[in-house]
Image: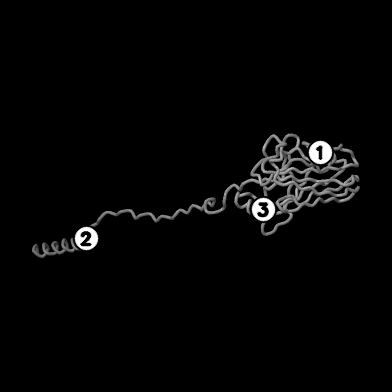
């Protein structure tokens, strides 16, 4: 279900079906806003809408959806923040790359009555991934709604020399954060278990009893035989 913003939207005005409007103050602390950018598009029934943003300082590239009803000119606002949005009560999960607020139309306009298939396209610098040892596959756009952070379905769609580009599905617009998890550990010798090799030992020979000088037994036997012969001769 697509929900409206949980915080003040970027304009006054009602949430009427034919008047999208939007574009005024969001309620974010001005000291927390690094950059604020607004794009306006004419909304026609059953049309594919894409809000486009300047890449200079803004990680959000596009906000896309299909319009179910005509609404005239509608504004989409992106606020890039220094820290966690002042409109939320808890910090986002994991290692945060950027905090931002995204608003589309008047409060209550960007709901399932008026739009479907909403996505946010954003970029993440490779230098941040490397310096913080981030697992690329864990990078996610998180949305704050219902007093809690929710990780959105996020997929990588492009890459260049300096950055990765992702697309995330969202059910509404409010405070967001791009975050990722650190890798479990660096690959290398530390994580490799070498197989244990047991050297085969040759048993030591069993000591044998000394038998004396070689040939000693034969010499003694011959001597006895000679003595016996001499005795026989004397007797004869």
What residue is shown with label 2? 213
Callout 3 touching callout 2 (CB < 8 Å): no
Q: Residues within 10 Å of mark 2 (few under 14, many from 20)?
A: few
Q: Quadrant of residue 225?
A: bottom left
Whether residue 185 appears in this view of the structure is yes
Residues at marks 2 and 1, CA–CA distance in whole angstroms = 109 Å
Residue at point 88% right, 50% down? 47
Residue at 63%, 51% (x, y): give it.
128
* Image quadrant where one finds the C terminus: bottom left
Work out whether residue 155 can be spotted: no
Q: Is residue 150 above or below residue 222?
A: above
Where does residue 1 sit, x and y in percent of width and height? 82, 39
- Residue drawn at point x = 22 percent, y = 58 percent: 212
Coordinates of residue 227 in the picture (x, y in percent) = 13, 62
The picture places residue 62, in percent across and down from the top left corner, at 78, 51
Query: Is 216 placed left or right of 79 in the picture?
Result: left
Foreground residue, 96 or 102? 102
Q: For the residue carrying disc 3, how many other residues have a C-alpha within 10 Å: few (<14), some (14-19), or many (20+)?
A: some
Q: How is the image coloured?
A: one colour
Q: Which residue is mark 1?
A: 4
Say which element carries label 2.
loop
The tag earlier along the polypeptide, 3 or 2, is 3
Residue drawn at point x = 84 percent, y = 40 percent: 106
Mark 3 vs mark 2, CA separation in Å: 88 Å
What is the C-alpha distance between the residues marked 3 and 1?
30 Å
Number of callouts: 3
Residue 22 in the figure: left or right of residue 127: right
Q: In the rendered image, which residue does mark 3 sit on?
A: 125
Give x and y (percent) for residue 127.
Answer: 63, 53
Mark 1 or mark 2, which is nearer the start of the sequence? 1
Mark 1 crowdedness (10 Å alpha carbons): few <14, some 14-19, many ≥20: many
């Amino acid at each position: 279900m697509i929900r409206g913003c949980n915080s003040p939207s970027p304009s006054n005005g009602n949430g009427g079906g034919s008047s999208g409007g939007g574009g005024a103050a969001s309620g974010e602390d001005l000291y927390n806003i690094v950059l604020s950018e607004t794009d306006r598009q004419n909304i026609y029934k059953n049309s594919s809408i894409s809000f486009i943003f300047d890449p200079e300082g803004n990680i959000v590239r596009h906000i896309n959806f299909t319009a179910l009803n005509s609404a005239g000119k509608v504004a989409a606002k992106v606020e890039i923040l220094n820290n966690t949005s002042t409109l939320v009560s808890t910090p986002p999960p994991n290692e945060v790359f950027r905090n931002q607020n995204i608003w589309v139309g008047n409060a209550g306009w960007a709901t399932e009555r008026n739009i479907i298939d909403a996505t946010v396209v954003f970029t993440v610098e490779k230098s941040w991934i490397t310096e913080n040892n981030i697992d690329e596959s864990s990078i996610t756009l998180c949305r704050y709604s219902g007093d809690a952070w929710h990780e959105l379905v996020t997929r990588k769609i492009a890459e260049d020399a300096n950055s990765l580009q992702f697309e995330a599905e969202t059910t509404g617009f409010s405070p967001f954060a791009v975050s990722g998890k650190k890798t479990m550990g660096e690959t290398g010798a530390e994580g490799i278990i070498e197989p244990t090799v047991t050297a085969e030992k040759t048993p030591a020979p069993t000591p044998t009893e000394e038998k004396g000088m070689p040939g000693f037994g034969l010499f003694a036997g011959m001597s006895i035989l000679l003595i016996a012969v001499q005795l026989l001769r004397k007797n004869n």
